[in-house]
Structure formats: structure tokens, C-alpha cells
Amino acid sequence: MIDSHCHLDFKPFHDRLDEVLASARDAGVHTIVNIGVDLKSSRRSVELASGHEMIFATVGVHPHDAGTMNDDVFAELKTLARHEKVVAIGEIGLDFYRDNSPRPIQRKVFHRQLQLAAELNMPVVIHTREAFGETFDIVCEYAPDLSGGVFHCFPGTVDQALQLFELGFVVGLGGVVTYKGARMADLAAEVPLDKIVLETDAPYLAPIPHRGKTNEPALMKHTCDRIAELRNITPAEVEKITDRACRKLYRMVETFGG
């Protein structure tokens, strides 16, 4: 399995990274994409990817941290993005739920990073919360010049997902699919499986039966198993098809077959 979105540079993993990676491998996770949310975490993501064969990285500034963007930050992100193990620009987007950064700044920084992705011919990792309509409209402006992307922890409906697929995007689904009454579970059952990538968003959003605890890549098996149950297919089939979708999205070498 590929964990397409996690944050191993965050504090819960600082003293136990080797243990977490070993547990992931034991659980069948062979590849992890560590997601940048600001300049510091983007640097750390690249460091992790450089030091561990199974880890890849993205670089970007999350809407929560949009206020930290300036010309120097942007210049360093652009340099980091050229590293051989950086596979996307992200996590970028709009968050009107927490509004940790003023909305005009969020919009400006989102546009700037989409422009960077277009310039570098890289996919994007999109975060959107309580802002899907505006996020989608902005992405539509750049979609012809982007090499695809993923709406991480996809919050929308089946119809909204179908709109994204027309743009060449996929959706990231994680532990929320295991929660009782989750709309994400309905989505996981209905949309084409080759338009889904699996993620943990570790250390957040741990699946049942670990909800409320620290999430980690090893727990992605619960998400895979739940999607298989919802679709009445085997977990192996879910893994094969979603891994292929992730490799296609991030343009990874077909190392693992499938």
C-alpha cells in the first residue's frame, strides 16, 4: 500500500520514526508521501525523503500558514520542489473553517503556488474545508496547465468528485471512511476506484478501532479493508488499483508492480 498523505515530521513521531516506519512495512505499506505545510516542514519532508527510500515528499504552504509566505519563502520552496524525491506542490488550498490566515491572503498564496506547480509541471495536493466551491473555481483556472492533483481528505459529494475527475484530479480517502455515517464512505462505495488514493493524514484522523489516538501509516490497512467491504471486493484489489492511481498521480517509477 501507498500512504499518499501523512506528516511524519510532526511532533508525535519525532522520537519514534524508525519504529513507525518498521510498523508500516510490517503492515504492508511500502511507500509514504510526506506532506509539507510550511517552509520548515517542507525542508523536513525533503530531509526525510532523502534519508529513507520508502519516503517521498511534497513542498508547500498550507492555508493555515499562508501568512508566512513571502518572496524568500517562495524562492526556497521553488528550489526544494526541484529535489528528485519531491513529487508535488502541497498541501495548498483554502480553509474557511478555521480561518487561521485571512481569506485574502489564503487566496493570494493559493494562486501563487498553483502558478508554481504549473511552471514546474507538477501535480498539486489540495486542502479545502468549508471552501469547496471557491477552491474548485480557482483550480479550474489553472487545470489546463497542471499535471493533475489530489483533493486530500475529500470533503465533498459524489457529484463534486465527478467534477474533479473531469479536471484530471483524484480524491484522497482516509480513516474517515471507517466512521459511522461518514459521507466519505458513501463516496468510497460509488466513485471509480482508479480515481481514489489512500491516505492516513497521520498523526490525525485515525481509523476505527483507533479513533482518537495517534494515526500512523500502519493503520491504513483499516481504511483499505473498509473500502473493500463497501465495494464487495478484496483488499488486495483495492490496494492494487489505488496504488496504481497514486503512482500515476505522483509519476513514481513502477517499482512495485500492479
Image (tube, grey):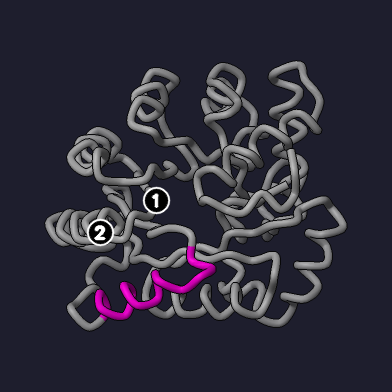
Secondary structure mainly formed by the magenta segment: helix
Whether residue 77 appears in magenta in the rendering, the answer is yes
Q: Quadrant of residue 38?
A: bottom left
Q: Nearer the viewer, mark 2 or mark 1?
A: 2
Q: Is residue 236 left or right of residue 58?
A: right
Residue 60 rendering spot, x and y as whole percentages? 36, 65
Residue at image mark 1: 123
Q: Amino acid at mark 2?
A: Glu
Q: Residue sitting at 66 percent across and 41 percent down? A: 243
Q: Is residue 30 left or right of residue 4?
A: right
Decide: is 18 above or below 98: below
Q: Residue sitting at 75 percent across and 49 percent down? A: 256
Q: Residue sitting at 76 percent across and 28 percent down? A: 237
Whether residue 41 appears in magenta in the rendering, the answer is no
Which region of the structure is painted magenta? 73-86
Decide: is 213 above or below 226: below
Residue at image mark 2: 119
80 or 173: nearer the eye? 80
Residue 133 rendering spot, x and y as whole percentages? 24, 33
Helix, strand or loop at mark 1: loop
Q: Are marks 2 and 1 in contact (CB under 8 Å)?
A: no
